[in-house]
Image: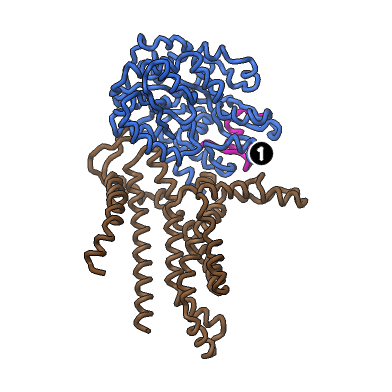
Amino acid sequence: MLRHFPKTLTAIGFGMICSATALSAEGLVVSNWDGYMAPDAIDAFNTASGNSAELVLHGTNEEIMGKLIASKGKGYDVVFVSSPFAEVLHNLGLAEELDHAKIPNIANLYEQATKLEHDPGNAFSVPYAWGTTGLCYRSDLVADAPDSWMDLLAPADAVRGKTTMLATDRWLLGAGFLAKGYSVNETDADKLGEVRDLLIEAKDTLLAYDDATFYAKLVSGEAELVHAWDGWCNYGIAENADIKYVIPSEGSDLWVDTMVILKNSENKDAAYSFVNFILDAKNHGWAAENILYKVPNEPAMSALSADMFATFPNMGITPDVLIGYEQLRDVGEATRAYARAVSEIKAAD
Amino acid sequence: MTDRKSLYLMTPALAWLTGLMVIPCLLILVLAFFRRGIYGGIEYTFTLENIWLVFDPLYAGIFVKSATIAGTSALIAVIVGYAAAYAIAAAPSRRQPMLLFFAVLPFWSNYLVRTYAWIVLLNREGLIASVVHSLGYDGELPRLLYTESAVVVGLVYNYLPFVILACYAPLSRLNPEVIEASRDLGGSGWTTFRRVTLPMTAPGIATGFVFVFVLSIGNFVTPALLGGGQFQMIGNLVYAQFLTANDWPFGAALSMFLIAIMMGLLTLQTFATERASGARKEES
C-alpha cells in the first residue's frame, strides 16, 4: 500500500505543497503515487479532452486518506488508493457510486477484476493494478528454493541474518497469518497473539524490516531472501536474472490498487473521462510495461511482448490465480490491535 | 536599548514562532483528548484513554528504550566532543577557525544523505567489509548495520558538531591565568582539569548533552535506516501513529509526553547554565 514509498519524507513535504495548490485549482485534480502512471498521462489527457487536469502526489495511502477525511473529499476528483482504503472511502460516503455508462473502457477489465471481494461489480472503485505478496530470493545464493512462509519466518541457518520483511502493519502480520493458515484479515485476539509471537521469533533471524529497498539489498547480496510484492521483485530481476519470485504454498494476499472518484467532486464528467482514459489499453498498459505491475486490463496485458513474460514470470500470474487469494480488507476497530501487535514485535528484543 | 525597541525587534520572531509553531503544536496536542474515529478520522468526544495508553508497559517501555539510546548517544558525544573542543581550544588561535570549520562541515550536507552514507559504509557488502575481505580475511564479519550500536553511532556522528560547538565556547573563554594559578598552587595537570577546567566548562557540557539527548530521543530517521526498523524509538512510534495506524489522537498523546520531556530537560539545562554563570559573576 505504499508502492512508491522510498522518499516518504520528501513525499510528505511534496504532499503539503501540492495540497495547497490542489484546493485552488479549477480543473480536475488527480492524486496518485509518484511515478505510478505515465509521466505524460496528464498532458495527454488534457490534450485529448481539453481539460486542465492536474496531478498531485501522495506518498502513502494514509497520507491521502488523512486529507480526504479532513476535507470530506473536497478538492480532489480522482484518487488512486489501495482497495481497503477505497472501501473506507465508500463506508464514509465519500466515494462516488460509479455510472458504468460513463466508463465504456471498463469493458477492458478481466471478468475476474469485476468480482473483487472489496467491491463486486466495481460499484465505487476501478482496479488499476493487482498482484501478490511472496518471496523474492537469489537463486544463486539460496541453496533450497523457498516454497513456504516458514522458509522466511524460520530460515535455514545459511540464510539467517540475510532476510528482510515488509514493515507495514498489514503485510508484516499477513506473512504470519498466511504461515499459520489464517485469514489475512483475522481479528481474533488469540490468533493475532500467536502470529505476533511467531513474528517476534522471526525477528531474531532478520537482517532488517524493509519496505522500500529490499530488492536493492538482494541485488547487492546483502540480503538473499526477502518478503516482497511481486512488482517490486521485478525491479530486482531486471538487474539480476538470478533473482526469482515465488508465492509460498500457503498462499498470498491479493493486493489491488484502485481508482476512486470522489462523491464531492465538482468535475465529475471530467473525472469519469479520466478514469476511462486510463482504462484505455495503451494507457493502462504503460504501468505493466514500465513499472512491471500486472494490470487487470485484458487487451493491455495481451499486448505485452512474450519477452516480458519470459523475463518477469510473475507478470504471467493469471487472473484466475489472483482472484483465488484473499484481499486485504478494512478491519475497522481491529486496526488498533494490529498497530499494537506490530509495536510489540518491533519493540521486542 | 529601550523596552519598546526590543519589543519591535522581537515581534517578527515571536509572531513566526507563535503562528507557525506554537499554534500548530497546540492544535495537534488537543487531539490527544479525542477519540480515533473508526476509519481513522477524529471523533470529537472527550476521552483520557489516549493519555493512559502512554503509560501502558509496552509504550512506556519504548520511552525508556529511547531514553537509553538517546542517553548513551549523548554521553558518547559529550566525551568525544569535549575532547575535540579541548584540542581545538588548545590549538594556536589562528588555526582554531579552520578546525571549527571542519568540525561543523558535515552539517552542510543533508542529514539523510549522511545517514545513507553510513549504510554504504557498514552494510554486509559495504566498504568496510570489502576492505577487510580484500586484506585477505575470509570469514563473516560481525554484523555492523541494523543493530542498536549502529543507531547510536549514527546519532553520535550526526550530533557531534553541536557538542563541539557547545563545549568550545566556554573552553575558549577560559582565562589561562586561572589554569596557571592552579598549577602555581601545586595542582597537577589532572587536578587542574578536574577541579578548575571541568567545573568552569560544565554549562557547555550540559548544553551539549541536552541537545544530543533531545534531538536523539525524538529522532526517527536514524533508527529506521541504521536500525533496519528493528529498534522502535518513540519518534518511530509517533510516526507510525500518524502515518500508518492513522491514530492521530494517540500519536498526539505520545508527542505531548515527548515534548514535555524535552521542555523539562531544556528548562533544567537553562536553569543550570544560569546558576553556573550567576555563581561565576558573584565570585568575580
What SS does tag 1 mark?
loop
Q: Is residue A269 above or below residue B105?
A: above
Residue A341 at x, y percent in the picture: 44, 40
The colour scheme used here is by chain
Residue type at mark 1 is Gly
| Above/below status of A45 relative to B17 | above
Residue A186 can be seen in this image: yes
**Display colour for chain A:** blue
Nearer to the camera, B220 or B204: B204
Q: Chain of mark 1?
A: A
Q: Quadrant of residue A89?
A: top left
Number of other residues with Cα within 10 Å of mark 1, as a class: few under 14, some 14 to 19, many 20 or more: some
Q: Is residue B76 visible?
A: no
Task: Read off the residue under disc 1.
Answer: A221
* The hue in which chain B appears in the rendered picture of the protein: brown
Considering every residue shown, the one lying at the far right of the view is B136
The magenta stretch spans residue A146: yes
Q: Which residues are magenta?
A: A145-166
Residue at horizontal 45%, vertical 24%? Answer: A257
Q: Is residue B20 left or right of residue A9?
A: left
Q: How far across and down, in percent of the image, does residue A179 sit? A: 54, 30
